[in-house]
Amino acid sequence: MRLRATPFAVLALAGTLAGFATPAAALDKITIMVGGVEKQIYLPAKLAERLGYFKDEGLEVEVLSEPSGVDAENELLAGNVQAVVGFYDHCIDLQAKGKFVQSVVQFSQAPGEVELVSTKHPEIKSAADFKGKSLGVTGLGSSTNFLTQYLAMKHGIKPGEFTTLPVGAGATFIAAMQQDKIQAGMTTEPTISRMLKTGEAAILIDMRTVEKTKEALGGTYPAASLYMSTAYVETHKEEVQKLANAMVKTLKFIATHSGAEIAEKMPKDYYAGDKDMYIKALDDGKAMFTADGVMPAGGPETVLAVLSSFSKNVQGKRIDLEKTYTTQFVKAAK
């Protein structure tokens, strides 16, 4: 079910005919699609809703979920939603295809992703051992797929020498590794902690902190963000500012509260049956989030360098990075 604009003109006419004043304007309605709402990397979207920050801004926001970032992106391009919570790299990839979207609030400065390797395959000691393997990603065309291709290329593995298999996250990712459909794969919390706890997987490449991300990718890598079509941003500045206000307030909440305090605000099913594990993952990983929603300096350049190294969509294209994000709204946030 998709949200539709309230027919204000009809309401106004009805009020006039009845001899009463026009009803008060309804809350501004916005639908946000998240590429896996239960993932901790996308925590701000659901947390803002749970804290009531959207309503505080006069917004009626519906937070929906798709299995991967590329699915969420497709919903935005189809006009079914007004915003996406997904990786910033989609803003660059889409510009290379002639479509303009921009990060309005930058949630994180590190991917928060880990390349896990099945403990059934001790022969995989680095990305150089990906040859001939099936590697799990959330979806084809997703950011996990982008990063997997880059890491393989960086370690001398050519396209076609490995397979990427879309397996989502959570239970579907875990099942794929248990059944040996994938020998390694990229995922996020709380899936990471669940597999480490059972001993079914080990960490091969860790990108949950800025420092480790720089080691793996060569620089700060802005990842989770709230992005919207440039046309929508330019024509709905009031609504975008309200969204930015709510999201920046949420990022400040994350920065100033413990994992336990944050977990108390989240739906219990997000704990995946282990609240203590969920809290520990939050405490260990929440430094990935920005405190103010501002794009980190040098980040867009790192993302462009990563995509340009393997993506035929981006190679040879002139990308105007300044059009892939804006800090206008976060800097003006209350």
Image (tube, rainbow, N blue to C red):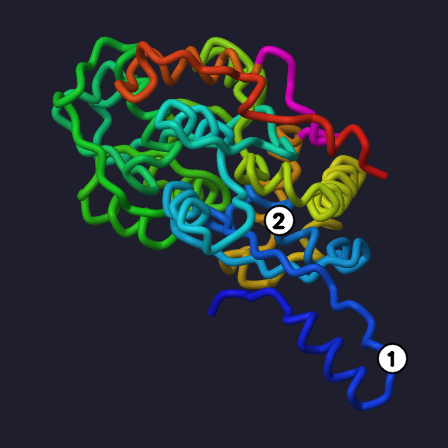
Residue at position x 56%, y 43% from top? 42
The quadrant in which residue 110 appears is: top right
Q: Nearer the viewer, mark 1 or mark 2?
A: 1
Query: Is residue 209 visible from the viewing direction of this image?
Result: yes
Residue wearing tag 1: 21
**At which x and y percent is residue 41?**
55, 39
46 up-or-down from 290: above or below: below
Magenta span of residues: 290-298
Q: Is residue 259 visible?
A: no
Residue 215 sits inside the magenta stretch:
no
Callout 2 crowding tier (Cα within 10 Å): few <14, some 14–19, many ≥20: many
Q: Check if mark 1's residue and mark 2's residue have beta carbons within 8 Å.
A: no
The amino acid type, in three-letter code, at marker 2 is Ala
Q: Which residue is mark 2?
A: 45
Kindly identify which numbered label has been placed on residue 57: none
Residue density around tag 1, few if under 14, some if 14–19, many if 20 or more, within 10 Å: few
Q: Does residue 241 appear to the left or right of 182 in the view shown?
A: right
